[in-house]
Image (spheres, grey):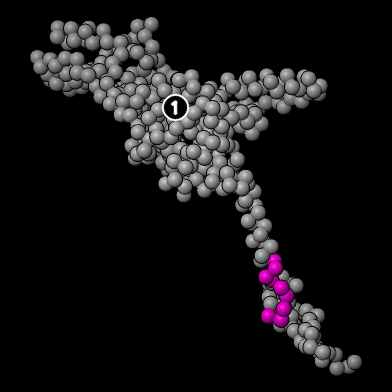
C-alpha cells in the first residue's frame, strides 16, 4: 500500500487541472457562418466579459419593467398586492428605483467553457493491480477547498491513478456537502420530450432559470442545454421569449459568435428597432475583427444596416422584414394587419347577393340557410323577390272546415 499512499499524496497537490482547449465549446460548427472567419482558438470567456461587448449586450437586452422583469411569477408563497397614492415626483423616483433593481435582476448568466471531460493519468502502479474489485475515490475535504477547485482522484482496479471526470467530481461534492437543489439525477424537463413540451409553452426562461439553479456555469450539461434552447429559439423564431431577461445577452452572444445573426436581425428590423439592428452588427464586428463588413465610429445606425445589406446580398431572403422596413418604414405587424384588412375587403366585395347564392350561407340568412329554405321567384317586371323563409320539410296544411 506504500505506492498507493504515495500516489494519492502527490495527486492531492493538484488543486485544479485544465486541458488545453483547441476551440470554444460555444462555437457550433454546424450552424456557424462560413464567411465570419471564426478563429479556432477564440477565447469566448474573455470576449464575453469585454466592456464593449457587455455594453452592446445590455442595450440589446432592453428593460421591460412591466411585462418581463416585474411581471407576475409563480412563487412558493402568496404575496399581498400593495397600492399607494403618489405625486408625480414620487412616482418618477419609484420608477427610477425599479429601473435600478431591474438592472440587478438582468445581470447576465456567466458564460464559461465547460470543464474538460478528459482525465489526467497521475501514475501507473502495476504493483497494486487487482488490489480490489472496486475503484477507490479520494476527495480533498479540507475546510478551505471549494466545490470548483476541490481535488478528486480515482484509483482504478488496474492501479491507474487519475483525476476525476466532471460527473464524478460533482457526485463527490454532493456526497460530502449535500445540496437540496441539486439531487443526483437531473430534472426530466432538461431532456426531450419534456424539454420540447416546455418550450412549446414558451417556458424558455423557466427552463434556463432552473438550469442555473441546478448546474454550475462550467458544467458540460449546462452548456449543452443552453445551446439546445438557443438553437430551438432560432428555429421557431421566438426571440421575444428571452428579451429583457438575463439570458438574452448570452443568447445574442452565442448567435454573434457563430455568425448566425440574420434571423434575429430580421426580427428586430420587422419591429422597427433599427438601433438594435445596428448594435447587433457592431457586436459581430467586435467579436470578429476580420469580418469583411466595414464599420466606422461615425456611421449612423441606418448606414450600418444598409451597408450590411449591401455587402451580404446573399442573405436577402432571410432579411425580408428588415428590407421592407428600410424601404417603406412600416413594421411587420402593421403590414400584416393592412394585408389582412385588404383581404377581408376583397372577400366582402366579391360576395354580392344574387339568385345563385341567396339560399346559401353567403345569403342574407347566413348559417340559418341550412335550417330554412329560401325560394327565389321572378315577378312580371323581372327583378327577383325572396319569399318569406319557412322551415325545411315543413308544410302548413289548410283546415278543410275553414
In the picture, the quarter occupied by the N terminus is top left
Identified at 33% across, 37% down, the residue is 29
Give the quadrant of residue 117.
top left
The residue sitting at the right extreme is 402
* 122 sits left or right of 327 in the view: left
Q: Is residue 198 above or below residue 395?
A: above
Location of mark 1 (residue): 286
Q: What residue occupies the far bottom of the structure in this picture? A: 400
Instruction: In this rendered view, identify the residue nearer to me: 253 or 397.
Output: 253
Residue at (42% x, 38% y) in the render = 260
| Residue 172 seen anywhere in this rendered image of the structure | yes
Mark 1 secondary-structure assignment: helix
Q: Which quarter of the image is occupied by the C terminus?
A: bottom right
Q: Nearer the viewer, residue 33 or 83?
A: 33
Instruction: Tell me, yes or no, if residue 137 can be seen here.
Output: no
Q: Label 1: how many residues lie within 10 Å, few (<14), some (14-19) or many (20+)?
A: some
Name the residue at the left extreme.
127
Q: Which residues are magenta?
A: 348-356
Front residue of 87 and 291: 291
State the image coordinates of residue 156 (x, y, percent, origin top left): 19, 20
Amino acid at each position: 500500500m506504500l505506492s498507493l499512499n504515495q500516489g494519492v499524496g502527490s495527486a492531492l497537490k493538484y488543486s485544479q487541472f485544465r486541458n488545453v482547449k483547441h476551440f470554444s465549446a460555444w462555437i457550433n460548427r454546424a450552424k456557424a457562418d462560413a464567411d465570419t472567419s471564426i478563429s479556432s482558438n477564440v477565447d469566448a470567456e474573455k470576449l464575453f466579459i469585454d466592456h464593449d461587448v457587455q455594453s452592446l449586450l445590455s442595450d440589446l437586452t432592453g428593460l421591460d419593467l412591466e411585462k418581463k422583469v416585474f411581471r407576475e411569477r409563480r412563487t412558493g408563497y402568496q404575496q399581498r398586492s400593495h397600492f399607494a397614492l403618489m405625486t408625480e415626483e414620487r412616482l418618477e423616483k419609484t420608477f427610477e428605483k425599479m429601473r435600478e433593481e431591474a438592472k440587478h435582476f438582468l445581470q447576465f448568466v456567466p458564460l464559461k467553457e465547460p470543464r474538460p471531460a478528459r482525465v489526467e493519468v497521475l501514475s501507473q502502479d502495476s504493483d497494486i493491480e487487482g488490489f480490489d474489485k472496486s475503484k477507490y475515490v479520494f476527495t480533498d475535504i479540507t475546510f478551505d477547498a471549494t466545490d470548483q477547485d476541490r481535488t478528486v482522484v480515482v484509483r482504478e482496479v488496474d492501479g491507474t491513478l487519475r483525476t476525476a471526470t466532471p460527473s464524478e467530481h460533482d457526485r463527490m461534492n454532493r456526497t460530502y456537502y449535500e445540496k437540496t437543489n441539486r439531487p443526483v439525477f437531473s430534472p426530466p424537463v432538461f431532456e426531450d420530450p419534456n424539454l420540447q413540451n416546455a418550450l412549446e409553452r414558451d417556458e424558455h426562461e423557466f427552463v434556463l432559470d432552473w438550469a442555473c439553479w441546478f448546474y454550475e456555469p462550467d458544467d458540460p450539461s449546462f452548456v449543452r442545454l443552453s445551446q439546445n434552447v438557443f438553437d430551438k429559439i432560432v428555429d421557431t423564431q421566438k426571440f421575444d421569449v428571452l428579451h429583457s431577461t438575463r439570458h438574452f445577452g448570452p443568447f445574442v452572444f452565442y448567435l454573434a459568435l457563430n455568425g448566425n445573426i440574420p434571423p434575429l436581425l430580421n426580427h428586430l428590423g420587422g419591429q422597427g428597432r433599427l438601433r438594435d439592428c445596428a448594435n447587433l452588427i457592431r457586436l459581430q464586428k467586435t467579436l470578429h475583427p476580420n469580418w469583411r463588413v466595414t464599420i466606422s465610429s461615425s456611421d449612423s445606425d441606418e448606414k450600418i444596416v444598409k451597408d450590411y445589406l449591401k455587402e451580404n446580398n446573399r442573405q436577402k431572403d432571410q432579411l425580408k422584414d428588415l428590407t421592407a422596413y428600410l424601404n417603406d418604414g412600416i413594421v411587420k405587424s402593421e403590414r400584416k394587419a393592412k394585408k389582412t384588412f385588404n383581404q377581408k375587403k376583397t372577400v366582402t366585395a366579391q360576395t354580392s347577393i344574387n339568385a345563385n347564392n341567396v339560399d346559401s350561407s353567403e345569403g342574407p340568412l347566413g348559417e340559418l340557410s341550412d335550417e330554412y329554405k329560401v325560394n327565389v321567384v321572378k315577378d312580371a317586371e323581372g327583378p327577383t323577390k325572396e319569399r318569406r323563409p319557412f322551415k325545411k320539410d315543413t308544410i302548413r296544411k289548410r283546415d278543410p272546415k275553414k
